Amino acid sequence: MSEAKLPTRLGFLHLGLGLAGSLCYNKFMKGQITERTFYQYLKCPNWVYFDVHVDEARPHQALMHKLQNDGMIEGKERDLISDREDLVEVTAEDPEEAFNQTLAFMAEGRQSIYHGVLVDKHWVGHPDMLEKVEGRSRFGDYYYIAADIKRTRQLRDDHKFQGCFYAELLERIQNTKPVMGYVINPENKVMPYHIEQFEGQYELTLTEIEKIIAGKRPAHFVTSGCKQSPWFSECRDESEGCDDLSLLNRVWREEVRRLSAAGIETIRQLAVKTISELELIVPDVSTGRLETMRDQAISIVENRHMIRSNVELPEASIEVFFDIESDPLRDFDYLFGVLVVEKGQQTYHSFFAESPEQEGEMWAEFVEFVERHLDAPIYHYGWFEHEVVQRFALRYGISEIAREALERNMIDILNVVRPAVIFPLSFYALKDIANYIGFTWRSSDASGANSVMWFEEWLKTKKPKILQKIMEYNEDDVIATYRLQRWMRENASL
């Protein structure tokens, strides 16, 4: 089989930790570059720096790493390789043995290698699967391509960079470089991409990563991606300490560069400028963006929100607030929570599935709920709920009346907030804004990522207290959405 004719349905499994080979590699050696390094760099370059150059260790959670890297739980991935023929697994736990076992399987010409490990000096690759295709390599009339299994349904830059990394490692090991990279989603759909189309960006990124590992400290620049890093508090504190412009919500690096070139290097310096002054010294940035950034700077300096425009929210006797809990490690959306507000009375309802096999039943109950509330606006925060609803409608079906109601009534309140209000916040996540307006979650460690960890723990233990904690977290999410809607209605409505 040639690489160009790679089948559109492949089975793959996420690979565990195993690395190195005859190159005498220490798996805990600082300074290694793995496929995960590209994710870390794109989220926060200082993540890479701190991991290498700071002696203090940060907790390692394998499931959290899988979650961040769009991986899935082993059981889900095993389902996807159940029909593979000539599938072999690298089982060695010792890093050197794992690499040697991978090479042995490649030399034997095995069709599919699961848990393979690729090593060259301080580069260590962990593709989910190595797949044999027709061609020439040092092994004979075939060579190997790499593929990862991801829960994503869209290719991201870090996925493509990881594929380029695998391709370069494979070239060094088998003397043939794959042309394509592959990501396989939970439906076993192959998402291919051409390696050469991303090599330029990949090589620039790799060069910067190598400089960081060699000791070059990246410029601090706080983004929402930094929240994924265990070093987030260090990044945030440093930026706050120097009043850095990256603390502006959704500011671009290029915008910061242009402001800095004009002599504006701090939020306080930006806050005192008039729009006329900014237009004169930063002519390449639009007036609208200059005004937004300047107002954001004033908001942060004075620690107050600013109403930029009024909003119109639909009035209804019954309003619904909606939030979904998911376990991306299993590609499993297990809880639909709704808060029904009628005449000031709040009632929380949960639609729960203990297993993926119960998703359809949960969805049917939710659709019946929608059919009983055809005229109620349904508020949610962010794009996720709308995406899941569309996916479930395709997967499990939906009545036409419920479909029309969802299309008509779903309101993403984040889209309402952004153009209307500037908050003195670097991030506009629901928890950031809700905390600002005075709402707090019952659990001190409440977060979307932790809710996944709680659910994984519940699946293992079935402890009622853990499930209760998840339900309370979801209920707090919908109450927070309601509180934000009320705040908007009181402070920014027509």
Image: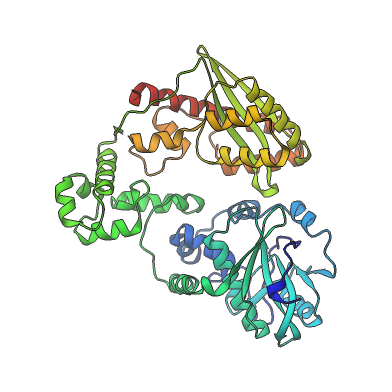
Residue 86 sits above or below residue 298 on the image: below
Q: Residue at x 65, y 47 (%)?
A: 328
128 on left or right of 30 = right
Q: Residue at x 31, y 50 (%)?
A: 241
| Number of numbered discs overlaid on the protein picture | 0
Question: Can see residue 430?
Answer: yes
| Quarter location, residue 389 | top right
Residue 174 sits above or below residue 44 on the image: below
Instruction: Give how far across and how far down residue 196 sits, in percent.
Output: 54, 75
> What colour scheme governs how the chains and residues are painted in the rendered image of this protein?
rainbow
For the N terminus, the quadrant is bottom right
Q: Residue at x 51, y 14 (%)?
A: 317
263 on left or right of 353 = left
Outermost residue to the top: 343
For the C terminus, the quadrant is top left
Instruction: Give how far across and how far down residue 392 sits, in percent.
Output: 67, 39
Residue 87 sits above or below residue 341 on the image: below
Choose between 271 and 147: the one closer to the eye: 147
| Quarter location, residue 176 | bottom right
Question: Can see residue 273?
Answer: no
Choose between 279 and 444: the one closer to the eye: 279
Instruction: Give how far across and how far down residue 105 sits, in percent.
Output: 79, 77
Choose between 20 and 383: the one closer to the eye: 383
Residue 163 sits above or below residue 443 on the image: below
Outermost residue to the front: 400
Instruction: Give how far across and how far down residue 141 sits, in percent.
Output: 76, 86
